[in-house]
Image: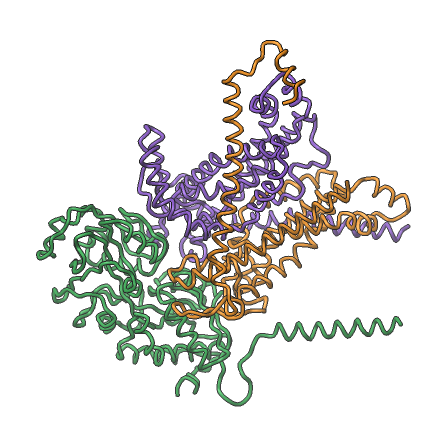
Chain colours: A green, B orange, C purple
Amino acid sequence: MIKGKRLVRLGAVALAVSVLSAACSKSGSGSGGGSFQGVALTGAGATFPQPIYKQWLIDFQKVEPSAKVNYQAIGSGGGVTQFTQQTVDFGASDAPLKSAEQAALPGGASSALEIPTVLGGVVIAYNVQGLQTGLKLDGTTAADIFLGKVKTWNDPEIQALNSDATLPPTAIQIVHRSDESGTTKVFTSWLSKESPTWSSQVGADKSVQWPVGVGGDGNDGVAAGISQTDGAVGYLSYDFAVTSNLGVAQIKRDSDGQFVAPSVDSISVAGGILQFPISETTNILNSSATGAYPISTTTYLLVYKDQKNKEKGQTLVDFLYWALTKGQDEVKTLHYSPLPSTIQQQALPLLSQITSGGQPLTPSSTVKS
Amino acid sequence: MSASAAGLRRTAASVHLSTRRKAKDRAFTIFLWACGVLAMLPLLFITGYVMAKGLSALNIDFFTKEPAAPGQSGGGIVQSFIGTGLIVGMAVLFSVPLGLLAGVYLSEYGNGKLASVVRFVAEILLSTPSIVAGAFIWAVVVVALGSFSAFAGAIALTVIMWPIIARATEEILRLVSEDLREGALALGLPRWKVILRVVIPTAGAGVFTAIMLAVARGLGETAPILLTALGNDFINVHPSQPTDALPLRIYEYARTPVASQHAIGWGGALMLLLGVLLLSITARVLSNRQQRRTR
Amino acid sequence: MARSRLGDRTFRGVSALAAVGLLGLLGLMLWVLASGGSRAFAKFGFGFLTGRNWNPVFGREQFGALPFIFGTLVTSAVALALAVPVAVGLAILLNEVHSGWLRDPLAVFVDLLAAIPSVVYGLWGLYVMKPLFDHRVEPFLTKTVGKVPVIGALFRGNPNGGDLFTAGVILAIMILPIITAVTREVVAVVPRDLREAAKALGATRYETVRYAVLPYARSGIVGASILGLGRALGETIAVSLVVGNGLGIGASLFRPGFTIPAVIASEFREATNIGVHRSALLALAVVLVAIALVMAALSRLFIRRSAKLISGGPPAGERERPAIQVAR
């Protein structure tokens, strides 16, 4: 009797152990023969490209079924922080790494790659009764507005750029981001380039001390804030502004004085001046390419050159290759701008720097077909 | 008012029920009832609204599929339910033994200075905002393990649930009459057997109730999970990987501009609310039954 | 005999370990948070608590916590101002008014309010309460109370967007249950004799409550309010969704604000360690633990005092709260 009970107990323990160990073993790639199936990855970072990244990841999983890539949009700052802390497999940031952030990487500066993926733009959106479309602005005027120097819409400074429009005397209400955001960084970087006053007084970063205005959480917070107040003006990422009903300003180009409205194409063209290697000052603001929208930006995926886990590294290389090739075909439907082919051709070779155990990882056949 | 009381009133020294006093009394009564109504309104309003908005989001996909791409319809949050089960399940595994044993100590052996200090510390932990537990566990577990994980989330919840279960267990065990203990001891049972075989079973339903309430609390916590489990769009059963949780998913969906995600968020809120209310009501019913039994 | 002694010792030891483990937990938590926050304290010293600027931009870093301390205090004050009168009224209603059919369901309802998760309050607050307040309640208040001198300054300002007032009201709803529950206990313990004596003298319900009940319950009500305050100070998720994330300090309740727990939740995952941003947030977490300590001590003091007043000593077993009340 006792022996029987003991046997049953032993059997139960053995069963539990085997079940537990099976459950705890990480899901591996499809073994033996056939194509690489990918493995689960975790990434975190920018909210700006989140819609296109999520779409990409769903479509990429059709190519490599075991590649369950979990992307959580916690903000560009979060992407860099968690990437540095190595709590995620890849990061996403709208801004290139600062030199201090490079230095803080385990493995030191240049131990990670910054790969541009899509382009976007920042638009100045407004809600002014009596001024439906066609507001024209330039950098200096925009800076003065956001500095609080220009207080009403019929101010001479604005009138000078919009001689054919009747501007109402409504007070200007600024709406800015209250959370850290790559969109803020791009916008304030552009304002800093255009206005020395802005540069010294406020500066450029994912979050700044705004001289005037109210804060909104995220793009939708800002859009809501603008739409609720007559005379309000703020900045939004282009893909978001397209679906809102707010007026969008045309911006004057520094290079040829033309006014350009933001569009998928005018932003895409701006990407042409992207310089490799990516450094902390890399940007595509005020692009000299013809017809380029001045307040454009690219967004980056951050990956370590030396991948400790070979399968994760392979999945990353495959995903990046796919994103830079097939993925580019999908971006326009979501109001993002694809990389110009010149830039795409310069980004792809970056992938060859990714190695694991000393061996370079090349994109598998699944994504090269 | 009975005749004798009315008579008492009339014969009481210089006291008479002036209109002014009557008016004050009436106003006071109205105020009291207003407070009652004011207290009921939010609950009715919130549960009603969550139900109305949440019901339309509940369908088969909601419970069985993972999220669709933003902007596309369909999809669900099956991974949130599984993730919550994983994280809270592990938290229960860790915090119940710890809390029960601590509660037993405080109740059965806890008449000295050490016990008073422990009690005070438990109250400090109870009053500490849960975001602090999240920050603490991020610094210790997430960084050390190199990954956000369900395990880290469970530890963060344990930090919150352990003192709750400990204090509640102590209160409940103290309600068990001393005679019961003395009787068992007189029969020759060693102290530890008295506690395990007599005291705890007698308090049985009460202890179970305390655990249920702690679980209800753990189910609804967002802040600690936010910093430790990261979230996941896919089902995850590995304790060492980032995992989704229902409150976390609701929080994230509340902040996006995507309408379809808002709708799912309401559905999630409805499920969470139902789960928590169910636990609380069951705990209350059990506790009432227990009280009636020991009366 | 020896065997059971061993069993006793082991059991006592193991349970003592679990209890003392709580001490270790608090100690470890304080150590981790304090060592993480030390860089921020070192850099800004006392100015960390009194500084008005919070600028995470690397190269211009300024971390002053005053806006968050201000926001935390203001939202909690609004919450208490709204919740305490209602809670006391409710507690008296449940104790003194004997319509059985309503009393029990009402008591149950209020307890269930305590169980609603913060994120559900937050979702509802963001999509139902906030628009209502932005478009109706706050403009109405500006037009009415806003015109009154001095106090009116609280109710003037741009009603759009999340603000301290909206957060305060949501907090009031959230802390109502615990203040009510403890006040009920406190009021119930006031001896019947006092009440009956008052009634015999011909006192109305109002007078009985005012002269025979409340004076004895006063300490306890303060204690209950402190418990509610503790809950309000620490509430994170619901507040962060409606408070507006603003850094200003001023008279108006309608301006966007920020609280200490909300800023930690909002910025922690993004805070880099190349500067002192993360350290500053960890330092704020230490501040929260310090506040919890003060709150725990205060509430003990007041509820014990109230118990002494009434019965001449603390109840057996140091019962300070209803047994099944799971306080947050």
Tell me: residue A238, above or below residue A29: above
Image location of residue A220, percent across then percent down:
34, 57
Tell me: A345 left or right of B13.
left
Of residues C130 and C21, the one drawn nearer to the viewer in this rendering: C130
Image location of residue B68, percent across then percent down:
44, 70
Residue C321 appearing in the image: yes
- Quadrant containing the C terminus of chain A is bottom left
- Quadrant containing the N terminus of chain A is bottom right
Tell me: B246 left or right of A365.
right
Image location of residue C117, percent across then percent down:
53, 51
Q: Residue furthest front?
A: B3
Residue C45 appearing in the image: no
Tell me: residue A90, above or below residue C259: below
Number of numbered markers: 0
Q: Name the quadrant containing residue A351.
A: bottom left
Tell me: B222 left or right of A343.
right
Image location of residue C319, percent across then percent down:
68, 37
Q: Name the quadrant containing residue B183.
A: top right
Tell me: residue A119, above or below residue B163: below
Tell me: residue B237, above or below residue A236: below
Q: Name the quadrant containing residue A190.
A: bottom left
Q: Residue furthest left?
A: A163
Of residues A129 and C23, the one drawn nearer to the viewer in this rendering: A129
Q: Residue furthest top?
A: B13
The residue positioned 54% from the left and 59% from the top of the image is B271
